[in-house]
Image (cartoon, coloured by chain):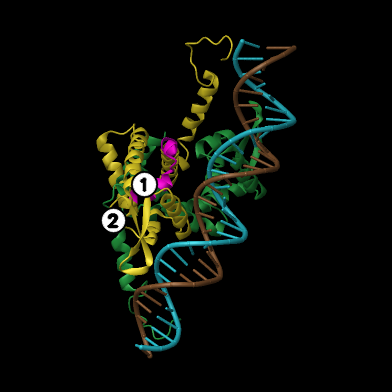
Chain colours: A yellow, B green, C brown, D cyan
Amino acid sequence: MPPSTPAAAASAPSPAKQARSEESEERFQDSALAREVAFLTARARGRGNALANQLLADLDLKVRHFSVLAMACSGTNPSQRELGGFLDLDPSQVVALVDILEDRGAIRREPDPRDRRSKILVATEAGHELYAQAAQRTREAEEQTLQALSPAERDQLRVLLAKIVF
Amino acid sequence: MPPSTPAAAASAPSPAKQARSEESEERFQDSALAREVAFLTARARGRGNALANQLLADLDLKVRHFSVLAMACSGTNPSQRELGGFLDLDPSQVVALVDILEDRGAIRREPDPRDRRSKILVATEAGHELYAQAAQRTREAEEQTLQALSPAERDQLRVLLAKIVF
DNA sequence: ACAAATCATTGACTTTCTCAATATTATCAA
DNA sequence: TTGATAATATTGAGAAAGTCAATGATTTGT
């Protein structure tokens, strides 16, 4: 504990520094960059990802693993290639992620009846349980990330984003 | 050129495959993951970034360099630390990016009159010109990315995103 | 004046991305 | 049918990006 710190006083980074930090953020919000949707989405995803990764950490998952698991649990029976397309992952990354989750016993590769080259991903019983726990944490993360928005605004945001990515 | 291809016919991936690809996208849009804002923002930023990087390629810039240059051109005189905070970049990454842009003669490190440890970033004349060209391309990228949205919707999106990241 | 914190920088290390090559299987046209 | 072409999952290599600890110079707080 820092000596002679008035315990109750403003705890965090010294008031002066803190002020200067926030001052710059404020100052930058008028910049052209801060008005670009690209910049805003990058920041949003960075923040959201970091938080979600934190909350998923004690399940030994990151967002990327969670996403694969989620799709395996979705009942849509994606092939690895389809999954890669949907999650913007290179086929080789899909292999690595699927390997990990399969080794953990959370998902299985099953033969695709329509194409013997391709493999379909499905969750195991344990995978569904893991997903249930993980999904709870990502919901928390989303709740925290969207704190500043009303329920209606959250829906608006979802709709707008869906329009541009689908 | 592929032999005996009916030149005018459906060019792209064979109609069957194409159909199957889009079919899976559609199929996945009902999944729980597709309703998460985190997923949607990740996809949006992925798409936007990729497109912007393409359009910036002939200027030998990527989005990350562009962002630094943009802030150097903003008139806000950010220090490297402030820039890192704003762009979610580790100090060491800032050093690397600034080195590149400084070697290119686009920006300069100037002493901070308030703190001799810190360095302030400003654009050179050439830097402003480069920025003008680059900004044009990122505007194109944004235009294409947001094609599906009306002007009003684009503003809404900007406002909502700004609320959650500032 | 001294101790602690901050800034830019370097370097090491891990994770993520990107790409090319391959074996197996499907598709398409002749 | 057969033969050429393309697609799937996989491996492996290399580049890019992200993370972290240590350092010298400087500032801040006591």
Residues drawn in magenta: A53-71
Amino acid carrying label 2: it is Thr
Query: At 34% from the left edge and 53% from the top edge, which residue is drawn?
Result: A165
Q: According to the image, label 2 marks what residue?
A: A76
Query: At 36% from the left edge and 69% from the top edge, which residue is drawn?
Result: A116
The local crowd at label 1, few if under 14, some if 14 to 19, many if 20 or more residues have their Cα within 10 Å, is many
Q: Quadrant of residue B90?
A: top right
Query: At 56% from the left edge and 48% from the top edge, which residue is drawn?
Result: B65
Task: Name the spot of residue B83 as percent of width and height, x first.
Answer: 55, 37
Reply yes or no: does residue A60 show up in magenta.
yes
Q: Is residue B36 left or right of residue A40?
A: left
Q: Chain of mark 2?
A: A
Q: According to the image, label 1 marks what residue?
A: B39
Reply yes or no: does residue B41 show up in magenta.
no
The local crowd at label 2, few if under 14, some if 14 to 19, many if 20 or more residues have their Cα within 10 Å, is some
The label number, if any, that marks residue B67 in the structure image:
none
Task: Name the spot of residue B10 as percent of width and height, x first.
Answer: 33, 75
Q: How many marks?
A: 2
Pick the residue in front: B27 or A94: A94
The image shows residue A28, relative to residue B54, as above or below, that is above
In front of the other: label 2 or label 1? 2
Q: Quadrant of residue B162?
A: top left
Say if residue B76 shows up in the picture.
no
- Image quarter hosting the N terminus of chain A: top right
Pointers 2 and 1 within a single chain: no
Chief secondary structure of the magenta portion: helix
Q: Are marks 2 and 1 in contact (CB under 8 Å)?
A: no
Amino acid carrying label 1: it is Phe
Q: For mark 1, give the secondary structure.
A: helix
Query: At 51% from the left edge and 50% from the top edge, which residue is drawn?
Result: B63
